[in-house]
Image (spheres, helix red, strand yellow):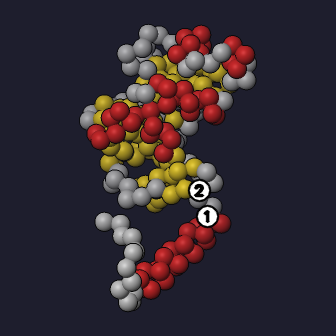
Amino acid sequence: MKINKLAAICKKSGTIMLYDQEDGGQWIGDGAAMYPAYDLPELNDDYIYAIFDIPEKKQKKMSYRRQGMPPSISVADSVPNENMLDPPKFDISVAGRILRPLKTQRGLIFIDTKYLLPLADADDYLELYERISTDGKLYVVVKNGFMLMAVILPYKIVTEDFVENMEELARLCKIAYENNSTNDGLEGSHENG
C-alpha cells in the first residue's frame, strides 16, 4: 500500500478514521474507504500524524476518530455470496471526481477512483467484489488474490438529474455513432482501439 496516497486522501477529506479489530488488526481510512494496516506497528493518533506527515498546527484542523470495526461490514478475506465484478470499461468525470461505474446485482454503482490510488503498486492484480452488509447495504472490497486490500463505499451520485443527464449523453453518443458510421472517409479521426 502506498501510505503517501492514503495520507493525501485523509488530508484532503480532513478526516482520519482508525478502526480496531477484535483480533488486534487495524484499518485506516477517511470514513468512505478503509485499508488494512499490514506490516505497521500498532497505530495511534501520534503515529498516524507522524507517518502522514501532518504537522501539529494542521492536526487541529483534522477530524480524528478511533473506533471498533463497523459491525455491519466484513473484512474477512472471503464471505459467502460475494460476487466478483467485471472489470470496468471506462471511468467518468463528474464534478471534479473520477468515478468508476460498476455493474452489480443491484444495478450500477460508482466508486471514486481516488480510493484505488493507495493500491497502485498492485494495480495489475486487483479484483473488485460486491458484498452486502448485515444492514442490507452494498459495498465494494478490493482484493489482491485472496487477500483483502480495501473496503470502499459507493459514491452516491445517482439522482433523477444524474439519470436524465446520462440518458441525454447516451442519446447524443448514439447520434455521433450514426454520423460516424456514414463518415465519407475524412482523414485524421481518432479511434479507440
Q: Quadrant of residue 163?
A: bottom right
Question: Quick check: can you spot residue 27?
Answer: yes
Position of residue 133 relative to residue 26, above or below, is below
- Circle 1 — which element? helix
Q: Quadrant of residue 89?
A: bottom left
Q: Amino acid at mark 2?
A: Val
In the image, which is nearer the foreground, mark 1 or mark 2? Answer: 2
Say which of 6 and 73 sits in front: 6
Residue 113 x %, y %: 48, 45
Which residue shows up at 46% across the image and 56% down it?
Answer: 91
The label shown at residue 187 is none
Residue 146 x %, y %: 27, 33
Query: Residue at label 2?
Result: 94
Query: Residue at label 1?
Result: 162
Residue, far left: 145
Position of residue 186 relative to residue 68, above or below, is below
Say which of 56 and 79 sits in front: 56
Residue 170 x %, y %: 50, 74
Where the N terminus falls, by quadrant? top left
Which of marks 2 and 1 precedes in the sequence? 2
Assess disc 1: are there few (<14), some (14-19) or many (≥20) residues with their C-alpha within 10 Å of its C-alpha. few
Question: Residue 66 vs residue 149: left or right?
Answer: right
